[in-house]
Image (tube, helix red, strand yellow):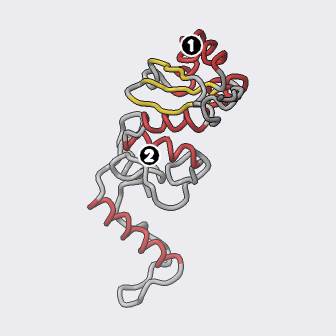
Amino acid sequence: MPEGEDSPRPSPSAPDAGERPAGPWLARAVLDAARAQRARFAPQARTASGRTGGGRTDPGRGGDGHRRLSGYSGPGPDPRDPQPIGAVLQRLIKARGWQRPAAEATLFGAWDRVVGADLAARCRPVKLADSELTVEAESPTWAAQLRLLAPSIVRRIAAEVGHDVVRKLRVHGPAASSLPRGSWRERTRRR
C-alpha cells in the first residue's frame, strides 16, 4: 500500500462481515487504523528535499523537528549523559556570576602554581582588596626582590587566574620579631 492511503488492502482471505479479524488480517487492521489516526492529528513532515514524507518523521525527532529527550541518549553526546564535575562547576560559576570570587580563591589556594615554587617558598599572599594584593616576604631582602619583580608577578597572576583580578602588588617585609626590644644588649652595672 503506498504511504498516505488509509484504505486497507484487500486480502484473498478477508473475514466476513460477521467474523472478528484474526492473525495477519488483525495486525493489518490495527496498523491501518493507527496510520489513519496519525494522519488526522500529525502534520505532514517535510523531508530534506522539501517533499512531504507522508506523515513519517525521523524517529529521533518530534513532529516539530526538535530532538526529543526521551529514552536512551544513543552514541553521541547528550545533555542527559553524566558530566564531569569540573564542567558542572564551571557552568554553575558562570550562571551565578562567581567568576571573580573563584579567581581570588584560586589565587590563594594555588599560590605556588600561580607564581612558581621558588617565589611561593619565600612569600605568601595575605590580603586581596580592591584589586591590590598584599604579599608578605620572609626577609627584607626578599621583600626588595619582590618589589622589583612585581610587574612580572602581576602578569603571571593575570595569565593564570584572569585579568583585573590583581592590578597592583603591595609587598611587606616579615612581621616584627617576637624577641623583646633590646634583649641582645649588654647589661651594664649601675653604680
Vertical comparison of 11 with 168: above or below:
below
With 78 as the anchor, is 131 left or right in this view? left
- Please rate how many residues cluster around mark 1, counting C-alpha atoms within 10 Å: few if below 14, some from 14 to 19, many from 20: some
Instruction: Depth check: give the residue in front, 99 or 21.
Output: 99
Circle 2 sits on which residue?
A: 92
Vertical comparison of 58 with 41: above or below:
above
Q: How far apart are marks 1 and 2 (CA)?
A: 37 Å
Instruction: Depth check: give the residue in front, 74 or 23.
Output: 74
Of labels 1 and 2, the one closer to you: 1
For the residues labelled 1 and 2, say whether their Cβ atoms are less than 8 Å apart.
Answer: no
- Splitting the image into 4 quarters, where does residue 184 fall? top right
With 173 as the anchor, is 8 left or right in this view? left
The numbered mark at residue 147 is 1
With 163 as the anchor, is 52 left or right in this view? left
Taking the spot 58% from the left edge, 30% from the top edge, the residue there is 176
Which x, y percent locates residue 189? 69, 29
Q: Which amino acid does label 2 sit on?
A: Leu
Name the N-terminal-most of marks 1 and 2.
Answer: 2
Which x, y percent locates residue 123? 63, 27
Q: Which amino acid does label 1 sit on?
A: Arg
Q: What element carries label 1?
A: helix
Q: Is mark 2 on a helix, strand or loop?
A: helix
Residue lying farthest bottom? 18
Residue lying farthest top? 148
Taking the spot 49% from the left edge, 20% from the top edge, the residue there is 170
Which x, y percent locates residue 112? 66, 30
- Please rate how many residues cluster around mark 2, counting C-alpha atoms within 10 Å: few if below 14, some from 14 to 19, many from 20: few
Which x, y percent locates residue 163? 46, 21
Residue lying farthest front? 191
Quick one: quadrant of the C terminus?
top right
